Image (tube, helix red, strand yellow):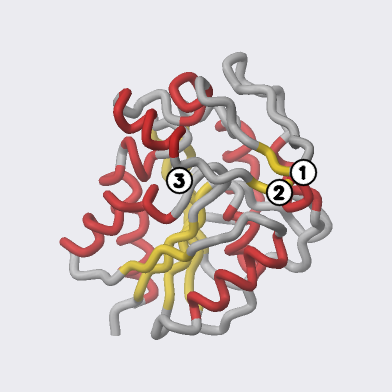
């Protein structure tokens, strides 16, 4: 039985960020669902993912981008057979998203971010072209900026329990041109989790700017667990 794929968006994005990957997987005969996260807290995001997983037959290859690396690491759903991290954050037990996000010196063009009066973190509009999706077209950058979803600051301060990557096979796509999460940090996390690592000269959102690269690593996981 072939595995199904659940795609999980990160901060400042939504499920539409996976559009090109969903199409690429469909061409390969693989069903994919994009899980909607509220980005209001890590526990609420994990609960939202689990609600999506209830509607997907197993086995499941779970794919997380950026912040949602922590989300896919926190689910206890038994149908999850493998994890794929795409330029993602993968805290260890007792660590927070902030711990790994700020582990290395930021890229010179990384934006300065902080919570507003509502405790929400927004990405400055110009950051989509300079750091978040510098390889995207101007039209794509404009859409990403216009549709961004802020993340609650408290989401990145929650300590993880035992992460799922300690008990399941994992893959990690390291984005070498990432200006949001340094490639050095991604390599550190991937090595620590014993993931099968693929590197590519892509920016922070390869699902938008290099979807074939993302599809390839997901298909590798699907082929192995399916």
| Placement of 100 over or under 171, stated as above or below | above
Q: Position of residue 43 (x, y in %)?
A: 72, 66
Q: Which mark is residue 173?
A: 3
Crowd around label 3: few <14 · some 14–19 · many ≥20 (10 Å): many
Tell me whether the residue at label 1 lies in contact with that at label 3, contact meaning CB atoms closer than 8 angstroms. Answer: no
Give the image quarter of residue 159: bottom right
- Distance between the alpha carbons at the discs numbered 1 and 3: 30 Å
> Circle 1 — which element?
loop
Answer with mark 2 or mark 1, whichever residue precedes in sequence. Answer: 1
Q: Residue furthest front?
A: 117
Q: Which residue is mark 1?
A: 119
| Placement of 175 over or under 5, stated as above or below | above
Crowd around label 2: few <14 · some 14–19 · many ≥20 (10 Å): many
Tell me whether the residue at label 2 lies in contact with that at label 1, contact meaning CB atoms closer than 8 angstroms. Answer: yes
Q: Position of residue 44 (x, y in %)?
A: 68, 66
| Placement of 107 over or under 190, stated as above or below | above
The residue shown at (49%, 78%) is 53
Q: Position of residue 64 (x, y in %)?
A: 51, 56
- Distance between the alpha carbons at the discs numbered 2 and 1: 6 Å
- Distance between the alpha carbons at the discs numbered 3 and 2: 26 Å
Task: Give left or right: position of 103 versus 193.
Answer: right
Which of labels 3 and 2 is toward the front? Answer: 2
Q: Which residue is mark 2?
A: 152
Crowd around label 1: few <14 · some 14–19 · many ≥20 (10 Å): some
Location of the N terminus by quadrant is bottom left
Answer with mark 1 or mark 3, whichever residue precedes in sequence. Answer: 1
The residue shown at (36%, 26%) is 135
> Circle 2 — which element?
strand
Residue nearest the observer in this picture, 209 or 127: 127
């Amino acid at each position: 039985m072939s595995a199904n794929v659940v795609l999980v968006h990160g901060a400042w994005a939504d499920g539409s960020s996976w559009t090109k990957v969903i199409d690429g997987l469909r061409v390969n005969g693989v069903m994919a669902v994009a899980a909607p996260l509220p980005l209001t807290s890590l526990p609420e995001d994990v609960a939202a993912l689990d609600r999506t997983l209830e509607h997907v037959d197993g086995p499941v290859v779970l794919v997380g981008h950026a912040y949602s690396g922590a989300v896919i690491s926190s689910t206890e759903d038994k149908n999850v057979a493998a994890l794929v991290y795409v330029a993602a954050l993968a805290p260890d037990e007792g660590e927070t998203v902030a711990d790994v996000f700020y582990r290395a010196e930021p890229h010179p063009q990384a934006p300065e971010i902080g919570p507003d009066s509502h405790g929400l973190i927004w990405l400055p509009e110009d950051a989509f072209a300079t750091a978040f999706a510098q390889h995207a077209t101007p039209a794509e950058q404009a859409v990403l900026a216009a549709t961004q979803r802020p993340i609650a600051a408290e989401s990145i301060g929650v300590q993880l329990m035992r992460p799922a990557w300690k008990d399941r096979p994992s893959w990690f796509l390291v984005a070498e041109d990432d200006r949001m999460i340094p490639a050095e940090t991604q390599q550190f996390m991937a090595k620590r989790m014993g993931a099968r690592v693929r590197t590519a000269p892509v920016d922070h959102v390869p699902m938008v700017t290099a979807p074939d690269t993302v599809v390839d690593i997901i298909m590798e996981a699907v082929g192995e667990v399916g």
